Structures are given as C-alpha cells and as structure tokens.
Image: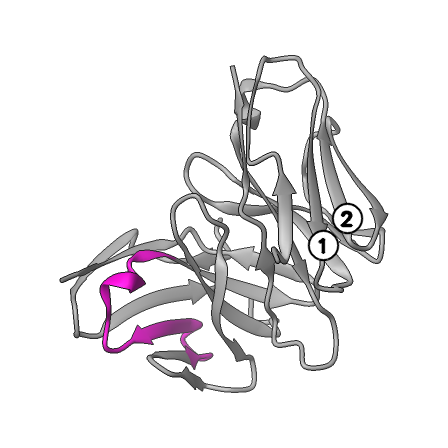
Amino acid sequence: DQQVKQNSPSLSVQEGRISILNCDYTNSMFDYFLWYKKYPAEGPTFLISISSIKDKNEDGRFTVFLNKSAKHLSLHIVPSQPGDSAVYFCAENYGQNFVFGPGTRLSVLP
Amino acid sequence: DTAVSQTPKYLVTQMGNDKSIKCEQNLGHDTMYWYKQDSKKFLKIMFSYNNKELIINETVPNRFSPKSPDKAHLNLHINSLELGDSAVYFCASSPQGGSYTGELFFGEGSRLTVL
C-alpha cells in the first residue's frame, strides 16, 4: 500500500491559469513534505517544502498547502507557464528517510 | 560545477554480468542515497549512508551492494544482473542540521538496461 499517493497521473492546464497538484499521505509522523519537479532525462529538482508545523508555504509562483486533519497537501502554481510542464513528485520526509509519491505529469498548454 | 554526479549515464549489459554505478557529491553533505525508478516511474529508496555508515537498507536483493569510501562518494555495485534490474538509478544527497529544510539533491540518473 502506498504511503504517499498522487491520484492524478496527469493534469493539463492553460498557460496563465492555476495548476493544482494534489498529494495524500497515510503516515502522520513526518518532518517535512517536499515537492520535486522532474524533466525527462534529468534528476528530480527540489521545488518547495513545508514543515509539519505549518499549513502554508509560499515561494514566488509556488504555494504549498498542508491539511493535517485530511492528510492532504497541494501545490499551487500561479500563473502556470509552459516551462512548468514536467512530472511533479511529492515526498514525505521523516528523519533521513524520503518516501515519494508516484508523480503527476503537468502539461501547461500555450 | 555539478553538485551530484553519477557515472555512467547509460549502461547496457547482458544478464548475469556485474556492473557498478558511481556517485560523487561536492556539496559537503553527510547523507547519500540510492533510489531506483522502475518502469512504473515510482522512485523507491534502496540505501542511505550517513558519514560512510549504512542507515537505511530497504528490501533489496543481496546482489546489490553499496560502498561508501568517504562521505562524498556512494557507489552501487550489482552482481549477476537480471532483466528486472533495468531501471533508472538516482543518487542523491542531503545536508543534516542547521538550515536543513528537507531537500534531497539528485544526480541526473543512470539508465541501466539489462538484455
């Protein structure tokens, strides 16, 4: 059973609109949740994280929301740009362990 | 300067062979990892080393043996390669303590194809 779930394998959004990527988890004992972005033939790159004691973290166009009661987090990208097209992984961090979700492929259409 | 570098980037080999993938990080991080991305694109942890000591060892066949000669290097040796070993293997590192906010820094990946 997956510890970190991303139930949408893909998402298409028009340029300039908001992209919302979702992630659900089962383990409540974590330190951080992180979002990673991955282009083809490259390694994942860190995008933004949120501490377990926060419910929101914002960095430029990227905002992550954490709802601990629902065991759910989301990444908002606004406005979306064609360069945002990539696979997005959410990952749970506790101690020195990182558990990744299966990823959501985002396509931003011009 | 590449922060986490892996070699080789592509590796094609026959079943039964032994092969190694090397990883080096120049970030001064204490912890290094090997992840496997399988055909379904899941990123699964295999091993983690902290200052040359093994701290995470997931259920991985004994044919896989990590070696960390120093904290900047974590190599992966695979014996008796099988078809199911075909995957992309990612090395990663992370800092600990201080301003740590949970980032993992990944290499570009090594695509292993076993024929």
Quarter residue A74 falls in: bottom left
The foreground one among A10 and B67 is B67
Closer to the camera, B55 or A28?
B55
Image mark 1: chain: B
Residue identified by numbered label 1: B32
Give the secondary structure at mark 1.
strand
Across and down, in percent, residue A94 comes to: 64, 67
Residue annotated with mark 2 = B73
Residue A108 percent location from the top left of the image: 21, 61
Q: Which mark is residue A97?
A: none
Q: Are marks 2 and 1 in contact (CB under 8 Å)?
A: yes
The amino acid sitting under disc 1 is: Met
The residue that appears at 29% across and 62% down in the rendered structure is: A83
The magenta stretch is A66-87
In the image, is residue A83 above or below residue A18? above
Few, some or many residues within 10 Å of mark 2 (<14, 14–19, 20+): many
Label 2 vs label 1, nearer the camera: 2
The picture places residue B68, in percent across and down from the top left corner, at 82, 45
Q: Is B47 part of what is drawn in magenta?
A: no
Q: Residue at x 62, y 74 (%)?
A: A31
Q: Is residue B70 positioned above or below A65 on the image?
A: above
Residue B103, x across and y down, in percent: 59, 68
Q: Is residue B12 above or below residue A55?
A: above
What is the residue that sits farthest to the front in this orientation?
A: B1
Residue A83 counted in the magenta span: yes
Q: Secondary structure at mark 2?
A: strand
Dot 2 or dot 1: first in sequence order is 1
- Residue at image location 36% in from the left, 72% down from the top: A75
Describe residue B44's horizontal placement relative to residue A13 as left or right: right
Q: Is residue B18 visible?
A: yes
Q: Amino acid at mark 2?
A: His
